[in-house]
Image (spheres, rainbow, N blue to C red):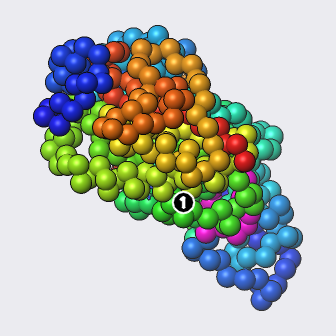
């Protein structure tokens, strides 16, 4: 927990935050509406004798009362997909519509890409990309299990991604669910902080800036880009968005989120950020008894 | 069943199938430009003839091939050919005498099926999902690939593809999809 000490000045009720980070997290699933309605999925869970609780902020997210969420009929049929509750936030903020062209830059293993497809009623095009070929096989497995027919899977570095292979040259929306130091997953992976170093923050934030920049460029004017990480470090969050604001044509915009959260930071470690970064959301584990996440929504302005 | 050998073109004019790229299926056999490639019409007819899935089900989808006889179904937009990792989901294998739908395809589209659907009892359903073969003498329909389904919360739900021969139903659920439920 030591690396988290640096967030004492920015987290309200820091002791509750630390205590939450030490508690392990239960099993949550997302209802895959490509294959089943919420009613059908919950009826299948009931038939299996599996208890559940619906998340207040999103009826498609269920907290399960079982230790083996993967061995239910609901899961076998692809009615449900194991996905941490806060990890269901970014796709709902991107809010894609049926028929649109959407880019998921860092998509493996596919929890959010298949959620985007479901939000689009599986109509339109979700380009699900990842630079790691090994993780692409997990992405493909999940896409097929969940019956997502609107996914096109590519294996490239998002930083210099080319759209030449497609018959369109820009996206309506893009999701950058960036590789990160994963501090917010500590409740699922107790060793998440083991390799923590400031040097890693520098290295990964360079990659994050490159990916977000490319995502803004590849998205049409008036289109939306969502930037998210499962980490608390401002170097990987507000500083990355600030870099995009400086270099690309985009601005931070508001979004509604019915989960308790804190505003994005406007300063950290002597650096000042655009005031509009307050519109980003920092979700801490003690606020809703979940993992941690950062989400910012951008509008492309040219 | 379902083969598409009726096209009159000479194979000499056709290019070889390229295993690295996805090519969109031609609408009909007459429009074929790649050797051995089946047509969209043949695929849709197969699902209708074998399983009674209405052809309109697929009106808003395109079908693609990568590698010999592995057919994919896609709802999005893409030019043909295209070299990417995956396009939609795999739905059918056509380069063998009997065409074989995939487990994930029948889970996604098999609710529309009205023929060649075998209904399993709870224990049989569990065995099928675990990948086990089982004696099932009661089936009086066609032999070959069937959709195995079971009742879940009052509605019939397809589990996967089974091969029915000589009174035995063999589960075709791929290893990675098998579960002990
Ligand atoms: C947080 S994970 C994505 C999780 C995924 N969005 C989901 O919901 O299942 C970050 C991913 O970024 C990928 N990645 C890292 N660097 C990348 C790059 N330069 N271009 C594309 N993907 C990259 C990693 O392989 C990893 O799969």
Instruction: Residue lying at the far left in this picture: please name it.
Output: A2
State the residue at coordinates (76%, 83%).
Answer: B14
In the rendered structure, the answer to whether residue A85 lies left or right of residue A195 reads: right
Let me know if residue B118 appears in the view.
Answer: no
The chief SS type of the magenta part is loop
Specify whether residue A147 is painted magenta.
no
In the rendered structure, the answer to whether residue B159 lies left or right of residue A138 reads: right
State the residue at coordinates (70%, 43%).
Answer: A301
Q: How many numbered marks are there?
A: 1
State the residue at coordinates (85%, 70%).
Answer: B31
State the residue at coordinates (50%, 14%).
Answer: A258
Specify the subunit that label 1 lies on: A
| Residue that mark 1 sits on | A154
Let me know if residue A266 appears in the view.
Answer: yes
Residue A216, given in percent of the width and then of the height, sits at 61, 49
Residue A295, given in percent of the width and then of the height, sits at 47, 32
Q: What segment carries the magenta color?
A: B70-83
């Amino acid at each position: 927990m030591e690396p988290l000490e640096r967030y004492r000045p920015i987290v309200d009720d820091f002791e509750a935050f630390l205590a939450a980070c030490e508690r392990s997290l239960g099993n949550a699933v997302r209802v895959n509406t490509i294959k089943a309605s919420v009613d059908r999925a919950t009826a299948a869970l009931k038939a299996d004798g599996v208890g559940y609780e619906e998340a207040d902020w999103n009826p498609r997210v269920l907290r399960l009362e079982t230790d083996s969420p993967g061995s239910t009929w609901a899961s076998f049929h692809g009615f449900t997909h194991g996905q941490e509750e806060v990890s269901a936030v970014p796709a709902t903020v991107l809010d894609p519509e049926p028929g649109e062209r959407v880019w998921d830059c860092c998509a493996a293993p596919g929890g959010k890409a298949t959620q985007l497809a479901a939000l689009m009623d599986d109509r339109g095009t979700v380009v699900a990309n990842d630079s790691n070929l090994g993780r692409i096989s997990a992405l493909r497995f999940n896409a097929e299990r969940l019956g997502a027919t609107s996914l096109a899977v590519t294996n490239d570095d998002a930083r210099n991604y080319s759209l030449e292979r497609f018959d369109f040259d820009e996206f309506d929306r893009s999701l950058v669910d960036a590789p990160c130091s994963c501090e917010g997953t500590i409740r699922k992976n107790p060793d998440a902080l083991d390799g923590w170093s400031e040097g890693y923050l520098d290295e990964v934030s360079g990659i994050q800036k490159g990916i977000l920049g490319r995502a803004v460029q590849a998205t049409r004017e008036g289109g939306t880009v969502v930037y998210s990480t499962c980490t608390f470090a401002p170097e990987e969050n507000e500083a990355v968005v600030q870099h995009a604001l400086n270099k690309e044509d985009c601005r931070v915009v508001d979004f509604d989120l019915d989960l308790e959260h804190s505003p994005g930071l406007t300063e950290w470690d002597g650096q000042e950020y655009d005031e509009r970064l307050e519109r980003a959301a920092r979700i801490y584990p003690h606020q809703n008894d979940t993992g941690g996440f950062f989400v910012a929504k951008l509008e492309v302005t040219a | 069943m379902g083969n598409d050998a009726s096209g009159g073109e000479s194979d000499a004019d056709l290019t070889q199938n390229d295993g690295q790229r996805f090519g969109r299926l031609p609408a009909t056999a007459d429009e074929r430009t790649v050797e051995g490639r089946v047509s969209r019409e043949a695929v849709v007819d197969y699902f209708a003839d074998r399983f009674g899935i209405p052809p309109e089900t697929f009106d808003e989808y395109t079908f693609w091939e990568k590698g010999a006889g592995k057919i994919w179904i896609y709802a999005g937009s893409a030019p043909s050919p295209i070299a990417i990792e995956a396009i939609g989901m795999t739905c059918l294998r056509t380069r063998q005498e009997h065409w074989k739908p995939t487990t994930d395809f029948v889970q996604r589209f098999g609710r529309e099926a009205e023929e060649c659907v075998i209904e399993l009892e709870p224990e049989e359903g569990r065995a099928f999902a675990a990948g086990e073969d089982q004696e099932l003498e009661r089936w009086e329909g066609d032999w070959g690939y069937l959709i195995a389904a079971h009742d879940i919360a009052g509605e019939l739900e397809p589990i996967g593809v089974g091969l029915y021969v000589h009174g035995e139903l063999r589960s075709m659920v791929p290893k990675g999809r098998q579960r002990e439920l």
